[in-house]
Amino acid sequence: MPEHDTLRRFIFEKLPVQGRHVHLDASWRAVLERQEYPAPVRALLGEAMVAMALLSATLKFDGAITLQVQGNGPLHLLVVQCTSHLSLRGLARWHGDLPDSGLQKLLGDGRLALTIEPAGKGERYQSIVPLEGETLAACLEGYFQRSEQLPTRLWLTAGDDSTAGLLLQVMPERQRNPDAWQHVTVLADTVTSKELKTLSAEQLLQRLYHEEDVRLFEATPVAFRCQCSRERIEATLRSLGAEEMYSILREQSKVHVDCEFCGRGYDFDAVDVQTLFVPDAQSAHSGARH
Ligand SMILES: [Zn+2]
């Protein structure tokens, strides 16, 4: 059975290693339908989407994980976000001539930021992933190594119709076994990009680990879904300030915002804009008391 837009977890019964396999199809095409990306940008965006789906599945709480690239290279912006419920969205912006390959040439003097954000009121946590490596997988692996988190390896690939990846990670609750880790990662290093894209999780594990006792769990669906809302857009407009908003209103009859991720449009007329900058009743009340 081929797998589409699914994430599957697996564990080695006798080794202290766990893994995840993800395959993105319609969710990846939904991103490509919104924007035509040149090949090197498309490849990195696809890999980033797979990586975030794999890492979001390691979140221990309700929330989201975001990878953001900011740089002065030809690819100056890339944002991919995946929630713990596996809603995925992403976009990239570039300019000028693009190099054929090489992460560092593409990003220039850029940086990769990984943000973990619990839903609700929890604390947001951001770390910088140094651009030390020629692939996104190498940079993320370096980050895991340096941040003294669990040894983790990633295999990522992006195609025109689908994109896929594999993650292996040491299981913290079991006794460490460096030989076992070496054994499973050396085997995974033999996987080809074509195998990643075309094999189901079951076939892939059979191909790599037919001599091991591997338990494969049920598939969880992954979907392209945007988290944008009128409330979030309002917060952004508020942060731009009243002066900026009123100046837009003087030129146009309304303020129109398109969500960059999903293309959904939001309109704010003069009354809406005014409402944005009126202190709400609650804060006015508490202000009066002090
Ligand atoms: Zn949206």
Image: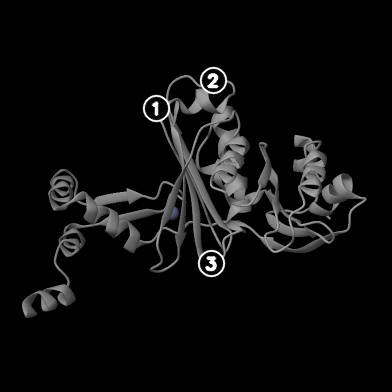
Q: In this view, does 51 lie above or below 10?
A: above
Q: Position of residue 245 (x, y in %)?
A: 18, 50
Q: Position of residue 22 (x, y in %)?
A: 69, 51
Residue 72 bears which disc, if any?
A: 1
Callouts 2 and 1 close, C-beta under 8 Å: no
Q: What residue type is labelled 3?
A: Phe
Question: Is the residue marked by circle 3 packed among few (<14), some (14-19), or many (20+) residues within 10 Å?
Answer: few
Q: Which is more toward the observer, 49 or 33?
A: 49
Callouts 3 and 2 close, C-beta under 8 Å: no
Instruction: Identify the residue at horizontal 34%, vertical 59% (top origin).
Output: 232
- Count of all numbered marks drawn on residues in the image: 3
Q: Which is more toward the observer, 234 or 22?
A: 22
Q: Which of marks 3 and 1 is in front?
A: 3
Q: Nearer the viewer, mark 2 or mark 1?
A: 1
- Marks 2/1: CA–CA distance: 14 Å
Q: What residue type is labelled 2?
A: Pro
Q: In which quarter of the image is the C terminus?
A: bottom left
Question: Is the residue marked by circle 1 packed among few (<14), some (14-19), or many (20+) residues within 10 Å?
Answer: some
Q: What residue type is labelled 1?
A: Asn
- Marks 3/1: CA–CA distance: 34 Å
- Return the residue at label 3: 61
Q: Is residue 243 above or below residue 10?
A: above
